[in-house]
Amino acid sequence: MTEPISPFDSEAIEQLRQQHRLDRQYVRALRNRLFKQFRSDEDATSNFPLRDSLQCHVLQQYRRFDSDLDGATKLLFRTEAGMLIESVILRIATGRTTLCVSSQVGCAAACDFCATGKMGIAKSLDYTEILDQVLQAGQLLAAEDGSLDNIVFMGMGEPFHNESNLHKTIEVLTAPDHFNRSPSRILVSTVGVSDAMIRMAQRFPKVNLALSLHSADQSTREKIIPLARRYPLDQLRTTIQRCNEIQSREVMIEYLMLRDVNDSVIDRDCLANWLDGLNVHLNLIPYNPIEDAPHLTGTEPDAIADFAGAMKGLGVKTTVRYSLGRDIDAACGQLVRKENRSYALQLNANATRHSPTA
Ligand code: SAH
């Protein structure tokens, strides 16, 4: 019995096709149904003569959480290696739907405010594992007559620490004979890995970039983002200038609002100064408190609105992120941490139960 083939693996699919002298139209139809129309596995593979050779998914859906408050759905997936990852579907009031995907299990950036960074591991996902998050979310939305509009790399992990799989994922997502998605509806958010940002802008100029700046003061930034030491603010500013030249499109600047850390008038002026002359828009993010950072508190909503107003007054295009799924959320990555703990306990319990020495 041969290993089942993933529809994401173009080479293996082509080999299978040649081996069985299958007409190309069958592969084309399979990809259209699965990747573009997001039909169910059953439906998408029904006409494929070698359907028993296929395994549509590399991820197993482990749990699903639907918000009672708004249109957010969190999906917890289990990888073949037994790790849990998280994707979030955001059905926004405007009717647009955004999917937030994970690129890693854990994250080496270890930012002070981030639940994923506190996991203490960093394992990169294979491109098939990133693509399967899109496929499964797309199928879920198609089954409820919805569509998937935007894909953002804002889930677990630092996408540029998994650069080759990130590039491969974007290639398959935008390939006309695969997912055929518009690059301008994809956004990659980074803690700020300069050289990789430039490579991305060069290779995929229409894909949107977001930089998690969170402070325009070097020493403050270093306190909350350890990686800031490696990529100092001056270098990041030059990087954005370079990306602006290559892409002729705005870079999103993400700015987490942390009380008494980065939300003073001095912080604001420092930020306005840093952003001056760059083709960017500023996105202020309300902080989602996490268990492992009890010393951090979010800026009050009124103060965020004042900060936004002042930035606009200084000529900076500014928006405030509206956060969905607060009831199922407790910050991106935190759910997986909780689930990982109970999952590990469960595995331990099973191992003990099945162990002959127990
Ligand atoms: N590693 C990438 C992408 C993952 S995080 C990056 O750093 O950009 C996506 C966004 O969520 C980042 O802007 C990150 O700083 C922000 N974030 C992390 N923890 C958060 C929290 N507790 N509350 C609100 N936003 C958070």
Image (cartoon, rainbow, N blue to C red):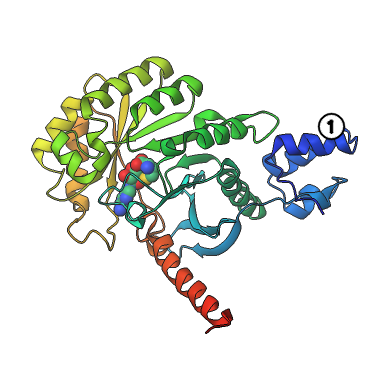
Q: Can I make out residue 277 in this image?
A: yes
**Residue sitting at the far bottom:** 358
Q: Is residue 179 above or below residue 46?
A: above
Quarter of the figure with the N terminus: bottom right
Amino acid on which the number 1 mark rests in the picture: Arg
- The quadrant in which residue 244 appears is top left
Q: In this view, does 85 lie above or below 264?
A: below
| Of 170 and 185, the residue lying toward us | 170
**Residue sitting at the far right:** 21
**Residue sitting at the far front:** 357
- Percent from the top left, x then y, of residue 147? 60, 45
Residue drawn at (16%, 25%), measured in percent from left and top? Answer: 273
Taking 143 as reference, is 209 left or right? left
Taking 302 as reference, is 192 left or right? right
List the residue tagged with mark 1: 24
- The quadrant in which residue 264 appears is top left
- Percent from the top left, x then y, of residue 78? 55, 59
**Label 1: which secondary element:** helix
- Percent from the top left, x then y, of residue 15? 80, 35
- Percent from the top left, x then y, of residue 217? 15, 34
Q: Can I make out residue 321 in this image?
A: no
Residue drawn at (78%, 41%), measured in percent from left and top? Answer: 30
